[in-house]
């Protein structure tokens, strides 16, 4: 197990300029480590900032202070200070993110959307689509839907397209935001299998899981974000 | 020179200066002509004057002719190749009256030939000047109406647009359908509109021994081709430039090497082709050449029957 | 995006004044090959002024625009000769106007529109030009049999796609776009966005796109600059700027869009 990501003394606050410039402190002094081959569940009650923390790990949200170091391209990259180019490269090659929301250009076929991250990494179009087909089949998206835009799909189908897209490239680090939230039993089992496979190949995974069963099934540890909430230790 | 002209004025007793324009105006035009000759194909602006004829009747050509003509010159004026059309006759009379110069219908005898829409068939010599009447001097205007932009395009040799026009011709007609005012590249530098002469005449411009001057009266532009200037017609590698050709010969003089006009004889579909260059045709007939519809010929009256 | 770290374009301290009025001021940024930069802001924020100044259409009052040319290395676009600048603009650069009519020749066929840039750089083989034009028409999803039709017979979306084909035929490396989806129906917008994104990726185009539509900016651009009153008030990774905006104006802009 090698260190893939570590968070040091991170603080986060939101300043809402449109609402009287009120500042809402969220975290302070966050310390977090993630190693290859482990799957850490981010825990805390609803509204405790699990998603905010995950977005910070993906550099989608900024940090007010501290550093988040990601092992990327053979070296450590502090994503709180890295250039946009470096962050985009990190996301392309090192860190995958399965969000709860599908954000795609309308009209693009599902198969293309799923294959895209692999094509971006330089894999031949045909090979990437082949792998996309495998994943979509495993996730039980009917073949007749592959050439359609997922924007017309049901919530559960969109979720599975998102998962297929997130798992197609073997990212060294993966962030999963409620990957099984709206799935039936069969599909949930498939996603858990995908997570296990990722762990086995050495991926470092951090995830938010809404139910204990899922968490117990795949997680090797947990990290309670509540303990770093501002005012939590007062 | 000026003395001669003044005396001539007194001789003719006319109220006009020699060749109508005042001497200052002629100097101004000559300066523009010198510049035009120095930069072959480049359009030189000049302060065009009002002439006693409407725009479109050759006011540009007339001003150029007035600026270069001397008392010893012999003038020929053609319109579509013919010496006897209204336009040609009135311009010839204009100079006969205002300059007292000799006029002729014979290409070989003329020292200055003013033309609208044709170049004589008989090759011109280095002691002759050909003056063209030009309606629209700017070849790029078809696709770019802004004068500021076309001048910049000339300055920077950006001539891709000319080929856009030719491309469009081919895509619409299967071949380059532009048959007159066919754009040419002058001395490898400026693209020039050869005035609405048929493209049949374009090859004659190339390396012509005579000086060629172009005057656009309405637009007040002068341009020129010094003797022996390279003039190439624009084209595509796979659609090379070619001139018109006719299956018929001239009905009057049987010429097969001249530009032919189609003449409708009646409303029954009878027609004949004749040389557009009347002097060329007459000269050939005088030398004994006969076309099938010449009145001397046994077949001559056939079409009229 | 490629791993090439050499900037294709470098803008330094660019200021454009209209008398006492500020068009844009003190703008600096780099653009790399294959990178898409979005410029957002409301009308009058200076984004179009900035685009004109960067794209060599309007010399700025102050500042430098440098471009890494294919042959001569890095050159100040306002210091090279006008002939070189215009050559650059019609070969290695492209400009996609909001209104397709501003970027097309409406009185010649689609094929001639696409072929113009090729002819401008000396292509003199009709058959090859026509084949290239047909090929590009296909790439922008217009049936090849429309090659000889006038752009005026095309729909708005098709005209915009034709404009893109006309611009990309010389394989430019830098494309400027001014509200390319403005004025189009929503369904047509989506198709155009998809097409643009595909072309940007496949051709490794660097793009500067001015838009007031944050959704368009999110889908197309890697990086975002937010302008207000002629100045860049916030810039960075597109999703960071839109999801965690720091500046008051950006927050206002983001909170003003309707969520779907």
Image (cartoon, coloured by chain):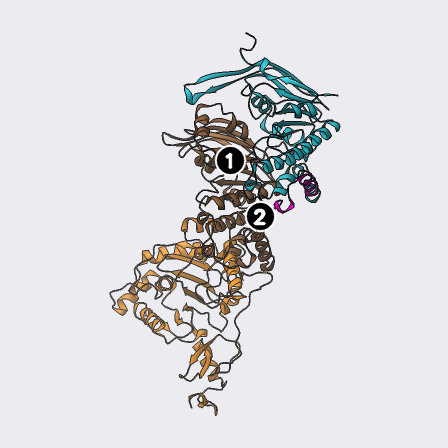
Tell us which disc is closer to us: 2 or 1: 1
Is residue C115 inside the magenta stretch?
no
Visible residue check, residue B125: no
Residue farthest top in this picture:
A234
User: Which quarter of the figure has residue C183?
Assistant: top left
Report the number of discs.
Answer: 2
Q: Quadrant of residue C197?
A: top right
Q: Which chain is brown?
A: C
Would residue A53 appear left or right of C152 to someone viewing this image?
right
Nearer to me, B79 or C47: C47
Query: Quick one: label 1, few (<14), some, or many (20+) residues within 10 Å?
Result: many
The hue used for chain A is cyan
At horizontal 42% and vertical 85% (from top left) the residue drawn is B268
In the picture, measured across the screen, residue B227 lies left or right of residue C200, that is: left
Q: Nearer the viewer, residue C155 or B276?
A: C155
**Which numbered disc, 2 or 1, marks the residue that appears first in the sequence?**
2
What segment is highlighted magenta in the picture? A129-148
On what subunit does the disc labeled 2 rest? C
Label disc, if present, on residue C170 of the rendered structure:
2
In this rendering, do the residues under marks 2 and 1 share a single chain?
yes
Compared with A28, C169 (above or below) is below
Q: On what subunit does the disc labeled 1 rest?
A: C
Chain coloured orange: B
- Circle 1 residue: C217
Q: Quadrant of residue C133?
A: bottom right
Q: Is residue A143 magenta?
A: yes
x then y, percent, for residue C101: 44, 49
């Amino acid at each position: 197990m090698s260190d893939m990501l570590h968070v040091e003394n991170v603080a986060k606050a939101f300043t809402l300029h449109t609402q009287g410039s009120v500042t809402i402190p969220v975290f302070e002094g966050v310390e977090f480590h993630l190693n290859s081959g482990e799957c850490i569940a981010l825990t805390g009650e609803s509204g405790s900032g699990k998603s905010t923390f995950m977005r910070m790990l993906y550099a989608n949200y900024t940090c007010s202070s501290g550093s988040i170091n990601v092992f990327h391209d053979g070296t450590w990259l502090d994503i709180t200070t890295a250039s946009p180019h470096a962050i985009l490269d990190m996301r392309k090659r090192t860190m995958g993110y399965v969000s709860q929301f599908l954000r795609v250009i309308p009209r693009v076929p599902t198969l293309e959307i799923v294959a895209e991250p692999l094509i971006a990494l330089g894999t031949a179009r045909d090979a990437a689509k082949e792998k996309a087909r495998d994943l979509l089949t495993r996730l039980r998206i009917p073949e007749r839907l592959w050439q359609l835009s997922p924007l017309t799909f049901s919530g559960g189908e969109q979720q599975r397209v998102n998962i297929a897209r997130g798992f197609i490239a073997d990212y060294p680090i993966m962030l999963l935001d409620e990957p099984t939230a709206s799935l039936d039993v069969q599909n949930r089992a498939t996603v858990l299998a995908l997570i296990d496979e990722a762990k086995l190949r050495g991926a470092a995974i951090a995830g938010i899981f809404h139910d204990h069963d899922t968490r117990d099934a795949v997680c090797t540890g947990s990290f309670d974000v509540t303990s770093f909430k501002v005012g939590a230790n007062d | 020179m000026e003395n001669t002209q003044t005396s001539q004025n007194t001789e003719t007793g006319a109220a006009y200066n020699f060749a109508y324009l005042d001497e200052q105006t002629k100097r101004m035009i000559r300066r523009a002509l010198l510049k035009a000759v120095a930069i072959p194909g480049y359009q030189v602006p000049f302060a065009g004057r009002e002439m006693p004829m409407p725009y479109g009747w050759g006011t540009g050509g007339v001003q150029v002719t007035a600026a270069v003509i001397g008392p010893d010159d012999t003038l020929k004026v053609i319109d579509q190749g013919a010496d006897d059309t209204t336009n040609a006759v009135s311009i010839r009379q204009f100079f006969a009256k205002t300059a007292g110069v000799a006029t002729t219908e014979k290409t070989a005898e003329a020292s200055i030939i003013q033309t609208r829409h044709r170049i004589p068939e008989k090759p011109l010599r280095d002691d002759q000047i050909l003056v063209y009447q030009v309606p629209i001097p700017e070849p790029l205007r078809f696709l770019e109406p802004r004068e500021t932009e076309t001048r910049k395009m000339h300055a920077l040799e950006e001539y891709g647009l000319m080929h856009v026009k030719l491309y469009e011709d081919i895509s619409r007609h299967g071949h380059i359908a532009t048959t007159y005012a066919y754009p040419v590249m002058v001395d490898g530098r400026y693209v020039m509109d050869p005035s609405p002469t048929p493209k049949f005449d374009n090859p004659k411009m190339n390396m012509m021994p005579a000086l060629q001057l172009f005057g656009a009266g309405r637009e007040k532009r002068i341009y020129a081709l010094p003797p022996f200037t390279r003039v190439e017609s624009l084209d595509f590698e796979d659609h090379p430039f070619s001139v018109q050709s006719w299956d018929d010969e001239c009905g009057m003089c049987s010429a097969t090497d001249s530009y032919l006009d189609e003449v409708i004889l009646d409303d029954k579909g009878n027609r004949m082709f004749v040389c557009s260059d009347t002097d060329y045709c007459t000269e050939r007939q005088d030398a004994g050449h006969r076309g099938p519809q010449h009145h001397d010929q046994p077949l001559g009256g056939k079409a009229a029957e | 995006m490629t791993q090439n770290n050499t900037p294709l374009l470098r803008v330094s301290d660019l200021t454009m004044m209209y008398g006492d009025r500020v068009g844009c001021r003190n703008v600096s940024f780099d653009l790399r090959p294959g990178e898409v930069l979005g410029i957002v802001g409301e009308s009058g924020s200076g984004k179009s002024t900035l685009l004109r100044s960067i794209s060599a259409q309007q010399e700025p009052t102050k500042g430098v625009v440098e471009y890494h040319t294919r042959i001569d290395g890095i050159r100040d676009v306002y210091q090279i000769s006008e002939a070189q600048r215009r050559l650059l603009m019609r070969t290695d650069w492209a400009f996609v106007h909001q209104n397709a009519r501003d970027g097309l020749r409406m009185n010649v066929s689609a094929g001639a529109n696409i072929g113009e840039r090729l002819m401008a750089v000396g292509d003199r083989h009709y058959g090859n030009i026509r084949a290239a034009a047909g090929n590009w028409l296909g790439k922008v999803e217009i049936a090849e049999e429309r090659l000889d039709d006038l752009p005026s017979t095309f729909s708005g979306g098709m005209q915009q796609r034709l404009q893109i084909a006309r611009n990309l035929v010389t394989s430019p490396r830098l494309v400027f776009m001014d509200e390319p989806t403005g004025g189009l129906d929503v369904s047509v917008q989506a198709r155009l966005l998809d097409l643009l994104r595909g072309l940007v990726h496949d051709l490794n185009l660097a793009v500067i796109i001015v838009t007031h539509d944050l959704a368009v900016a999110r889908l197309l651009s890697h990086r975002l600059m937010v302008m207000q009153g002629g100045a860049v008030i916030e810039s960075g990774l597109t999703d960071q700027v839109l999801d965690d905006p720091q500046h008051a104006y950006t927050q206002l802009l983001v909170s003003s869009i309707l969520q779907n």
